[in-house]
Amino acid sequence: KNGEDITLTIDAIIQSKLYNHIKTGATTKLDETERVVTEVSGTSDKSSSVVMNYQTGEVLSLISTPSYDPNEFVMGMSSSRWSALNESPDKPMFNRTKATFVPGSSFKPVTAAMGLTTGKLDPNENFGHSGLSWQKDESWGNYKVTTLVDYGSLKDLHNALVYSDNIYFAKAALKIGPESFADQLTKLGFGETMPFEFGLTDSQISQKGKITSEVQLADSGYGQGQLLVNPVHMASVYSAFMNEGNMVSPYLEFRSTTAPEYWKEQVFSKEAVDIVRKELIQVVESPQGTGHSAKTNGITLAGKTGTAEIKATKEDVTGTELGWFNAFTTDAGTSKPFVVIMMVEDVKDRGGSHYVIPIVKSVFE
């Protein structure tokens, strides 16, 4: 019988323009039937991007690069072309929007919101000066948590988010505690299959589904350890910062009505999201903020950078890095309530998360 017509929520203009910012040498044009056509040359970053309306859950853009031309599967391809697609080290057949990745510092707002919601974290508490490296006590052996900037003696939530302080969030995770930390992540949908038309890998707390050591807990507080997050799931979590603590349910098939449906309700307290949102605005607005280069005339953005390390040990200098930048509009009554999640692989020696910021900024511009 005839197939069913499917209309997606994807916005072809946003999808093509964002793809072009990621893909080197790409151009967009309209063909003779007024369809958007992308012509590609050059190489591409290994990346995943999600643009979502955080009020309704409509996914407006869903991009994995490098990609391939699906028409080849209809028209036919040579065995050498098939081998090239499957054997390429860039893995164009691997859909990164369906996968999970280490979130790095882009996870810090989540730790903050969990701590505030459980009452384990006081945003005004000064955690004390620790320099650029810190460990709880000698039981950690040679292991220390390190951070990049020593910004002074006031180690409160505001400065910790603005300067992206790993040590602060390691201490915050220890305050929350291993059982509460894991329980809060379970409440956010970690370890659970997200209801989405395009199957996603489940985000994970750890390989065993729980926190098994103080070091693992401390590392998880700033998005390392064994945490893995799917980018679409991340968009839903970030939507809670604009939905009074409710995580919107993302969807991909167009609906005639756009009343929001929430996947998880009241995952954070309203007070917690108000505090975190205010501080994420400062991550972009403050000249000291790690996301300040995303500041865009005419709109107020909130966001968080993240550079996740992928290496065998703390001493390993051969590993790679993932760059994240997650941002959303905060203006009351905006006609474009967008959250943008972007992850780019192999950003080591390319600016880390700062490599990603201009691409995300282009969506809002």
Image (cartoon, rainbow, N blue to C red):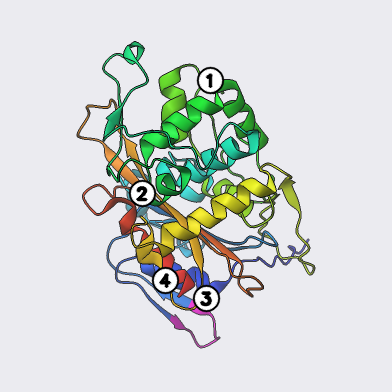
Q: Residue furthest bottom?
A: 32
CA distance separating discs 2 and 4: 23 Å
* Residue linked to disc 4: 362
Residue 24 x %, y %: 30, 67
Of badges 3 and 2, the one in the foreground is 2
Q: Are marks 2 and 4 in contact (CB under 8 Å)?
A: no
**Disc 3 residue type (three-letter):** Ile
**Element marked by disc 4:** helix
Q: Which mark is residue 163?
A: 2
Say which of 190 and 111 sits in front: 111
Place residue 28 in its image quadrant: bottom left
In terms of secondary structure, where does tag 3 sit? Answer: helix
SS under mark 1: loop
User: How dense is the environment of label 4, judged by Cα within 10 Å: few (below 14), some, or many (20 and up)?
Assistant: few
Check the image and report above or below for 126 versus 198.
Answer: above
> Which residue bears the numbered disc 1?
208
- Residue 223, given in percent of the width and then of the height, sits at 44, 37
Give the label, 3 or 1, closer to the camera. 1
Q: Quadrant of residue 148?
A: top left
Write down the residue under mark 3.
Answer: 13
The first of marks 4 and 1 along the sequence is: 1
Q: Which residue type does callout 2 highlight?
A: Tyr
Mark 2: few, some, or many residues within 10 Å (few <14, many ≥20)? many
- Which of discs 1 and 2 lies nearer the camera? The answer is 2
In magenta stretch: residue 33: yes
Nearer the observer, 89 or 112: 112
Measure the C-alpha gap from mark 4 to mark 3: 13 Å
User: Which circle's residue, 3 or 1, is located before the other in the chain?
Assistant: 3
Part of the protein shown in magenta:
29-36
Tell me whether circle 4 and circle 1 mark residues in contact (CB < 8 Å).
no
Label located before the other in sequence (1 or 2): 2
